[in-house]
Image (spheres, helix red, strand yellow):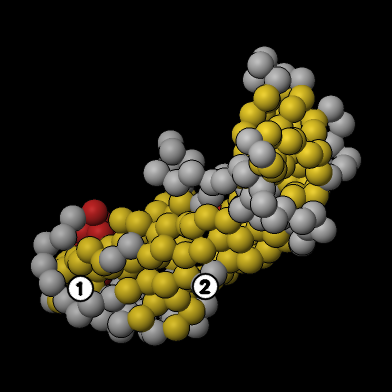
């Protein structure tokens, strides 16, 4: 009978068949230097009724998870972890207890991740979150809210492609250094007496519109902490739709 109940507690994560006390997952903001390593820390609240749990993890491009090295936290009690890579590249995490132990509130697990060389300022997502409990011989499952978390990879580079025309407009959320990017020049624009003048710059503050000139190619532009370029009066502005 116990194995039957275990089987149900896992399978019924895929379909909601009842209601139980609300559980929720949360994720700490992820902050890491380009090329560095950190952990995605997932916590559980309201978990005392659940014996099994699942969620999908979606990371931004440039972050790679070493899911096989995931460690379980204090919210678990002898639970088993299963991880699968989906066709989309997202990861499916399933936690369950062969003894039907319930989760506790607190840190659920830590997932090691490695950052690539590109800067990132985006979000990650836990989705299709479900928990399950067992009441008598019945499995009771609940769909829980998705969890969104911020992802910041500092330093590194951003990538920009110039087409065959040789020009592109660009605005980055990061301050950039063009001084070491061979074959690519950035310009800001000023207007005086209806005359537009383009001035080359080697460093550009964040959120600054520039005109790029270069050969058709893809360029890696270093991200810097701040820019020494004065862009007061720059006529190139960011258009938001």
Q: In this orientation, which residue lies closer to the viewer: 200 or 121? A: 200
Quadrant position of residue 136:
bottom left
Is any atom of residue 185 visible in this view? Answer: yes
Q: Which mark is residue 17?
A: none
The answer to whether residue 76 of the structure is visible from this angle is no
Which sits in the foreground, 91 or 29? 29
Q: Nearer the viewer, mark 1 or mark 2?
A: 2
Position of residue 39 measured from the top left corner of the image (x, y, whole percent): 61, 66
Label 1, on which residue?
A: 134
Q: Quadrant of the C terminus?
A: top left
Q: Residue, x 16% and y 60% (percent of image)?
A: 16
- Within 10 Å of the Cα at label 2, are there few (<14), some (14-19), or many (20+) other Cα atoms? some
Q: Position of residue 146 (x, y in %)?
A: 33, 62
In this view, the residue in front, 181 or 165, is 165
For the view shown, which residue lies furthest in the front direction? 193
Q: Which residue is mark 2?
A: 28
Comparing 181 with 93, the one in front is: 181
Q: Is residue 214 above or below residue 205?
A: above
Query: Residue 41's x, y, as percent?
Result: 53, 71
Q: Residue 132, image x and y in percent?
A: 25, 68
Where disc 1 sits, the SS reads strand
Number of other residues with Cα within 10 Å of mark 1, as a class: few under 14, some 14 to 19, many 20 or more: many
Q: Secondary structure at mark 2?
A: loop
């Amino acid at each position: 009978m116990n194995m039957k109940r275990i089987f149900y507690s896992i399978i019924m994560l895929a379909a909601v068949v009842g209601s139980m006390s609300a559980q929720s997952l949360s994720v700490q903001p992820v902050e890491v230097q380009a090329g560095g390593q950190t952990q995605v820390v997932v916590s559980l609240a309201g978990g005392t009724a659940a014996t099994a749990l699942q969620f999908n993890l979606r990371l931004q491009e440039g972050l790679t998870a070493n899911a096989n090295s995931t460690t379980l936290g204090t919210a678990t009690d002898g639970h088993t972890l299963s991880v699968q890579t989906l066709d989309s590249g997202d990861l499916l995490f399933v936690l369950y207890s062969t003894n039907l132990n319930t989760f506790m509130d607190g840190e659920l697990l830590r997932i090691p991740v490695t950052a690539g060389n590109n800067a990132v300022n985006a979000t990650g997502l836990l989705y299709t979150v479900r928990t399950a409990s067992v009441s008598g011989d019945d499995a009771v499952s609940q769909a829980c809210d998705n969890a969104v978390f911020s992802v910041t990879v500092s330093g590194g580079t951003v990538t920009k492609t110039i087409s065959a025309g040789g020009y592109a407009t660009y605005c980055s959320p990061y301050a950039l250094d063009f001084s070491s990017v061979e074959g690519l020049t950035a310009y800001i624009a000023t207007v005086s007496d209806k005359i537009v003048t383009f001035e080359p710059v080697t460093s550009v503050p964040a959120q600054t519109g520039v005109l790029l000139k270069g050969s058709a190619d893809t360029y890696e532009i270093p991200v810097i902490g701040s820019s020494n370029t004065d862009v007061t009066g720059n006529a190139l502005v960011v258009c938001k739709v």
